[in-house]
Amino acid sequence: MALQSLTGAVSPTTLPAGDGFGGAMAGWRLQRLAFGLAVGGAYALILAPVLAVMLISLFAQEIVSFPPDGFTLAWYGNAWDRREFARGFATSLQLALIAAAIGVPLGTAAALALDRSFRGRWQALGGALNTLLLGPLAVPGLVAGTALYIFYVRAEFWVDDDIKGTLPGLVAAHVLLTIPWTVRMVLASLAGLDRAPEEAAANLGARPFTVFRRVTLPMLRPGVVAASLFSFIQSFENLELTLLLVGPGRTTLPVAMLNYLEFRIDPTLAAVATVQILLVGALMLVTDRFVSLSRVV
Amino acid sequence: MGTLGLDSLSRRYGGTVAVERVDLEVAEGELVALLGPSGCGKTTTLRMVAGFVPPSSGTVRIGGRDVTRLPPHARDTGMVFQSYALFPHMSVGRNVAFGLEMRGIGKAERETRVREALRLVRLEGLEDRLPRQLSGGQQQRVALARALVVNPAVFLLDEPLSNLDAKLRAEVRAEIRGLQQRLGLTTLFVTHDQEEALTMADRLVVMERGRVRQVGTAEAIYARPADLFVAGFIGRINVLRGRLEGPGRFLAEGPTGPAATLPCPAATPPARPVLTIRPERIGIRPGAESGIPARLVQTAYLGPRTEYHFDLGTPGSGPVPLLAIRDTPGPAEPLHRLRTGDAAGLHWEAEDALLLPDDPA
């Protein structure tokens, strides 16, 4: 209404036209506003839990309530003093690095085979294998964890040695987490790959493995780097699959946090989670400097 | 350097034939162009020479040695790809050095030869650039240097000019031909551009639907095409249907009846002959006193030359179109005054026309 009277006052002789223009303008602004609100709302929804956790880690009181009594870094000290978190962090880090180091080469090899070896009459088999390799994403972590637990118990009987509760047992389980991500991302990179440079390398005298090492792999680098990053994160943050497979003195960080939660609810967990979030965030930033993640993911 | 030989080389994909029994000998230092429309099998033939496509049957010989079963890296061919296929993550210098490195040549010699090769293609000083920092023409020259630096027995070019703009294309064309002749490279060149083939090649191989239609020098193929496909694919040509009235006399027929008697060679004609004549071999006399009576339908001015579209038809025959191309006449020449609708007398030497067998279609 205000807009209408304003345009009317400025050019009273062309009131109908001015009126229409003002109305269109107002509608346009309203659309922009609604769009902005929707986008802002979506971001708020995504970021709110993360920011809330970071904020709560600084609250002074033990039982979380709002408004806070004050702010303190004491919970970070507490997290450090309770050695299970530091040990869990070390175990998770070690586990994620080893799992990614094994899973990414395996997944890359699988993606290459899917892209190049299953042609013609083998195409259907390739499709089936592709689905199978993505399987770990579809099976709920707890179910897969239980299945692995039962399998490990049997396997221990056969090999006459411990598997569950050991690092190799955990690594084998976490490699399963890394493969679907790697296969997906490397396949996406392969889909857009120009084959001519590989032929040029062969033409210049490079044997097939040299072609792969000197030309194919460097051209796939962004996809492989992104796959490594996401494999690491998947392993580092996994709780469900890991829950039944950890052993005494070999607990991952997420499992240590769950254990702590059974007895106490205080901002110590928020402090640990904040450290975890910052670590992953830093990893992504560093990776993004080397390969533009938005181009791959 | 070496010779290249293809013996009855074929490639089939399931039931479809990509290349059918191609025989070819390329002499040392010779440039042979494989020319044909897309899908004629010329690129497949080249890729069989390089080893990227295994032949269904037949053999490939390089320097007299049978290489049919050898993998690409053991064949000693130097190929320039249509997309250049430079290694995007390596500098220009490392791109060019790659083949030398694969041959186990030491660093010092490698550097000398890379510098030499880059000088040859006029890119000295750009060793440290990445391919994406170069223009299309420069990338093209890096691809040339990379293939040349290893002194391949056979040099293979797959439509190397098709990604360049028209002006650059003429320049690079001359440059490639110059290099090839200076270095005496045995070269197989794939193109769909007849001008490229005519200007660059010692000999042309015209292909269609997997088969070789004709092999010969540019002059031989242009002047004496083996069949209607070659005649129509290389340059422009008039094709007149009809029948022989007698030795050296061809009666052209229009849609509804006979139109005109035309001069043609008296030698033994093929079965079901058609008369073909290049447009620039046709002389025009304005007025209709002598020669083959024709009416000017349309002209197209091309600067140095002018196209004259005639009709040889009579009222009983329906239209019989014929194209003549002459140097654009000066104002004093009678041809200058020839207007659309005017009558003219056309003439040509009997030996300029060529009787070819009609297409089975």
Image (cartoon, coloured by chain):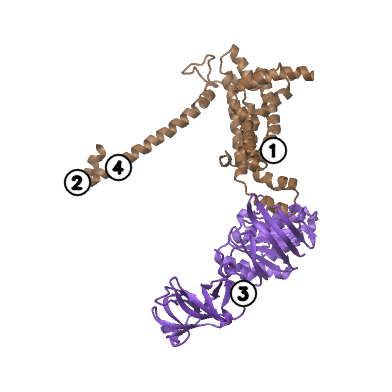
Q: Which residue is mark 3?
A: B224
Comparing A230 with B259, the one in front is B259
Quarter of the figure that contains the N terminus of chain A: top left
Q: In the visual, does B289 lie left or right of A130?
A: left
**Chain under label 2?**
A
Residues packed near mark 3 inside 10 Å, few (<14), some (14 to 19) or many (20 plus):
some
Say which chain is purple: B
Q: Are marks 1 and 4 in contact (CB under 8 Å)?
A: no
Cα–Cα span, label 3 and label 2: 84 Å
Which residue is located at x 25 percent, y 44 percent?
A: A20
Query: Quick one: SS at disc 4?
Result: helix
Comparing A129 with B153, the one in front is A129
**Chain under label 1?**
A
Say which chain is brown: A
Residues packed near mark 4 inside 10 Å, few (<14), some (14 to 19) or many (20 plus):
few
Q: Which residue is mark 1?
A: A109
Q: Which residue is mark 2?
A: A12
Cα–Cα span, label 1 and label 4: 57 Å
Q: Is residue A80 visible?
A: no
Q: Residue furthest front?
A: B246
Label 3 in the same subunit as label 4 = no
Amino acid marked by disc 4: Ala
Q: Position of residue B42 (x, y in %)?
A: 64, 60
Cα–Cα span, label 1 and label 3: 56 Å
Eye-nearest disc, 1 or 3: 3
Q: Are marks 3 and 2 in contact (CB under 8 Å)?
A: no
